[in-house]
Amino acid sequence: MLKQRKIFTYYQGQRFEIVEDLPEIGYYIYVYNPNNNCISDHLQDTLLTAKKFAFEKYGIPVDAWKTTDS
């Protein structure tokens, strides 16, 4: 079974996760509302690109992400 790498942060009352998919797929950014419902997702090629996209779209600092076990 594939162990997915996952990082998360809370920013402006919302939870955000970046989850690694298969290498040929990339990384998904998931956006959750305060009720913990996923309201948006974005696919990026690399982890760095995902962090930069989250900064550009949502203002999340690149160093704000924390690791978690999946």
Image (cartoon, grey):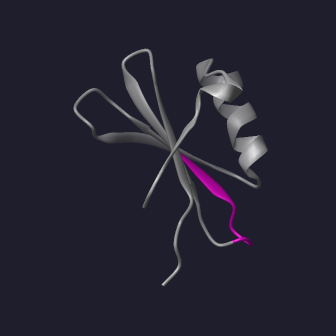
Image spot of residue 44 (x, y percent):
70, 50
Location of residue 52 with respect to 46 vertically, above or below? above
Image spot of residue 3 (x, y percent):
52, 72
Quadrant, the C terminus: bottom left
Camera-side residue of 70 and 42: 70
| Residue that extends furthest to the bottom in the rendered view of this protein | 1
Camera-side residue of 35 and 9: 9
Q: In which quarter of the image is residue 24?
A: bottom right
- For the point 72% across and 71% down, which residue is it? 23
Location of residue 70 with respect to 9 vertically, above or below? below
Q: In which quarter of the image is residue 34?
A: top left
- For the point 49% across and 39% down, which residue is it? 8
Exactly how many numbered labels are in the figure? 0
Image spot of residue 25 (x, y percent):
68, 67
- Whether 24 is among the magenta residues is yes
Q: What stretch is highlighted in magenta?
A: 23-29
Q: In this view, does 29 lie to the left or right of 52?
A: left
- Whether 10 is among the magenta residues is no
Location of residue 60 with respect to 8 vertically, above or below? above
| Residue that extends furthest to the left in the rendered view of this protein | 35
